[in-house]
Amino acid sequence: MKKQLTPWLVAGAILGAGALSALAHSGATGVVLERMNGMMMLAEQVKSLNLMLVGNTELDRAKAAIAAEMISKHAGSAMLDLFPEGSIEGPSVAKAEIWERWSEFEALAQRLGELGDELGEAVLVSATVVEPQNVAVAPVLSEWEQLDTEMLLGLKTRQKRKAELDSAVINLTATSTLPQKRAPKDVFTDIAANCSACHSAFRR
């Protein structure tokens, strides 16, 4: 069953930018302030993408690609660097479980980066009509071109040569099949779900 975006899922992914902004001016300093600012930036990108991919705003592919790049660049190791062990002082909303379950947190951060990369490609690829890539066209060969040295010398029958040509066409079809790109909205659904899962487990 295809996943559907729901209001609560998107709301969770948006991070509550307003609340974080207030917290950022309530005594946060150092790495805590830095990561709050980073999360607010991510919230703005998700909010912008939500309007374009789920709401009624027209999709601006250039803007969506930039948002996807921002998500990708601030995920993965860049995000992990903002969570040195025990950094929950002041108005931080991070839970201690982050460091108790670091491998899970790391996987979510890395996955966000991968999804950001995928979304960036998806919004650009979807701008053009992609012709089917799984149909191979066999070359049209003349009677002479269908012969080879062994056949000319009587070492191979015409039936054997035909079987070789048919096999070449099958191999061409297999190698020309390219993986299909997901639609931008489907990738965004996974981004929202990834953010929601991380917040549910590791954010107060």
Image (cartoon, helix red, strand yellow):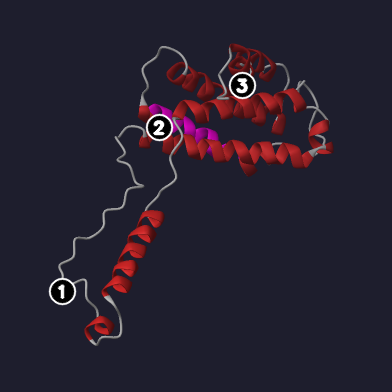
The disc labelled 3 sits on which kind of residue? Ala
Q: Which mark is residue 144?
A: 1
Q: Disc 1 or disc 2, which is closer to the eye?
A: 1
> Residue 71 in the image: x percent, y percent?
54, 33
Between 76 and 191, the one nearer to me in the picture: 191
Q: Do the residues labelled 1 and 2 touch (CB within 8 Å)?
A: no
C-alpha separation, residue under disc 3 versus residue under disc 1: 65 Å
Q: Is the magenta stretch mostly helix, strand or loop?
A: helix
Q: What residue type is labelled 2?
A: Val
Task: Name the image quarter holding residue 96.
Answer: top right
* Residue 119 x %, y %: 47, 34
Q: How far apart are marks 2 and 3 (CA)?
A: 20 Å
Q: Which residue is drawn at 36% across and 28% down?
A: 61
Q: What element carries label 1?
A: loop
Q: Give the range drawn in magenta.
A: 63-75
The quarter of the image holding the C terminus is: top right
Q: Could you tell me which residue is drawn at 34 percent across and 69 percent down?
A: 164
Q: Earlier in the sequence, mark 3 or mark 1?
A: 3
Mark 2 neighbour density, 10 Å: few (under 14) some (14–19) many (20 or more): many
Residue named by callout 3: 13
Secondary element type, mark 2? helix
